[in-house]
Image (cartoon, rainbow, N blue to C red):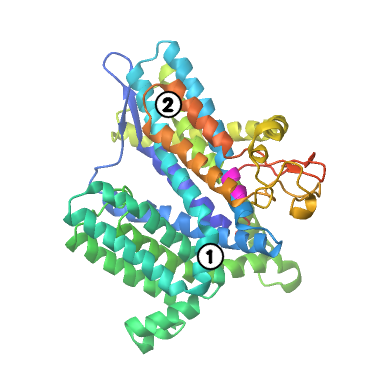
Amino acid sequence: MDVVRAACVLIVVMLHALMVGVQRSSDGGLSTQVALAGTEWFAPVSWLIQIMPLFFIVGGFASAQHWRGVKSRGGTAAEFVRSRVRRLALPAATMILVVGSALALAGGLGVDPALLAEARLRVAQPLWFLAVYIGVTAMVPIMMRMHGLRPTVTLLGLGGGIVIVDAVRLTAELPAVGYANLVFVWLLMQQLGFLLSDGRVEVWASRRVRMGLGAGTGARRCGGVPRGMLLSIVVLGLLVVVVTRGPYSVDMLVNLNPPTAALALLGLAQFFALSAVKPRLDRWWHAADDSEHSGAVSARGAMRVRAIARAGSAVSAGSMTLYLWHMPVVLAVAAAIWAVGLPLPVPHSEAWWLTRIPWLVALALVWGGAYAMRQAMTRAWQNVVRRALTSVAARWTLPSWGWSSRGKHSPRGASADQGVRTNRGASANQGTSANQAVLYVLAAVAGVVIVLFCLGDIIPSTLVASALLTLSVWPVPRRGRAGGIVGEDRSAPGDTGDEAR
């Protein structure tokens, strides 16, 4: 699944990079516009490049595996949520603080406030994903339990919620109601990822296919076409009817804000297509791993597969960093081109199209160099921040409020026999209470929401958002029998980091 997730992230990054239209204004300044959107050919192409549903499906697959691993080690739901929020929030806090500081400095140097506002908006817009992903991920333990008890009922319930929200939004003409589908649509995509992680999609789908399409379609393949691909085609056909006869836009980017039933159908089609190709992908990886002994594939073929797998793993491991930083890099490169006097063709002109490949290559080189520098500096910086936060947290943060490591109120000197973990090598996520986990989720989501909607003065909103996101990764020091600190978080925060092959 690493390769699929890497492909999703790269498609999103390339799309956003191509949609940034910058050119010189008549007075020599820099003006911006949204490129590509609104062109005649873009709507049908959006069916191919709208991969956010697929990303949530793959995320659900990875989260299901991670949650099962946490449970097998005796972990709790609060510890799982804590670890997930930590991996997502720390890169976001860093980006918001750095970019906010840079924009504030630019404003102090006299840069056009309108241009700074546009830059801030462009940087903040992709962060909606982070807030939703944190919220959806926090629901994994609950939704996995529902999935284990009634998988089909859970899927139908979420699907019904999507339809009801759309019906109310359209009939009552209440656009704001549509944002309730931020919950239903993305939870549904995550549930589909759970189903994929079970390895029982074939069994589950065959029963539904027989009921819905007739007994003859229950075979593993139909006319040489895998059943999953057949179902994907059927769902796409239904989607065509919905967008041509119904109230939905043909443009799948329009259906993203707010999420609609049309987007959910696209995600369902992507799910069935992925379920059809996943067995073949798995066979390729396993054949490459066993090639030296089995001879299943040639040595050259095995090397190619391994190279693809390594590249996919590398991009997937840095997926959150890439997603968070791609717009700041795009805007920085555009500003640098303008500052040195290089040409900035008018969007959609012939010259603009001819320069798109060099533009993407330049962005890739800049981002790659910045990522390499970040990796070199990250470990030392994280150690400094971790020790500082742990030292402060040991004195006046959450444990001083009377929360024990297992979520029950207890005095500061509570015995380790009451559930406090004292082994030095344990993860700092151990000992997280349910109350603390909820606080971390709310703090992280609130920090992102402030960046998204508080577009006034840069400095206050940057500081408040960074503080909230920092709170969401605040260490939970563990105390021994005498109440002393016996350990600290030594897990390296970073990207999504799921081992989701």
Chief secondary structure of the magenta portion: helix
Amino acid at dot 1: Met
* Total labels drawn: 2
> Residue at left 34%, top 33%?
352
Q: Which mark is residue 429?
A: none
Q: Nearer the viewer, mark 2 or mark 1?
A: 1
Instruction: Decide which of tag 2 and tag 1 comes sooner along the chain.
Output: 1
The location of residue 165, given as percent across then percent down, is: 28, 58
Judge from the rendering whether residue 108 lies leftward or rightward of residue 40; answer left or right.
right
Amino acid at dot 2: Ala
In the picture, the quarter occupied by the C terminus is bottom right
Up-down relation of residue 119 to residue 64 (above or below): above
Q: Nearer the viewer, residue 421 or 131?
A: 421
> Which span of residues is magenta-colored?
82-87
In the picture, the quarter occupied by the N terminus is bottom right
Q: Nearer the viewer, residue 25 or 54?
A: 54
Examine the image and state in which quarter residue 354 appears: top left
Residue at the front extreme?
Answer: 411
Judge from the rendering whether residue 184 lies leftward or rightward of residue 177; answer left or right.
right
> Residue at left 52%, top 56%?
59
Judge from the rendering whether residue 267 lies leftward or rightward of residue 421; answer left or right.
left
Q: Which mark is residue 144?
A: 1
* SS at mark 2 in the image: helix
Whether residue 434 appears in this view of the structure is yes
The location of residue 107, given as percent across then percent down, is: 42, 15
- Residue at mark 2: 334
The verdict on residue 85 being magenta is yes
* SS at mark 1 in the image: helix
Whole-angstrom CA distance, mark 2 to mark 1, is 44 Å
The location of residue 403, given as percent across then percent down, is: 65, 45
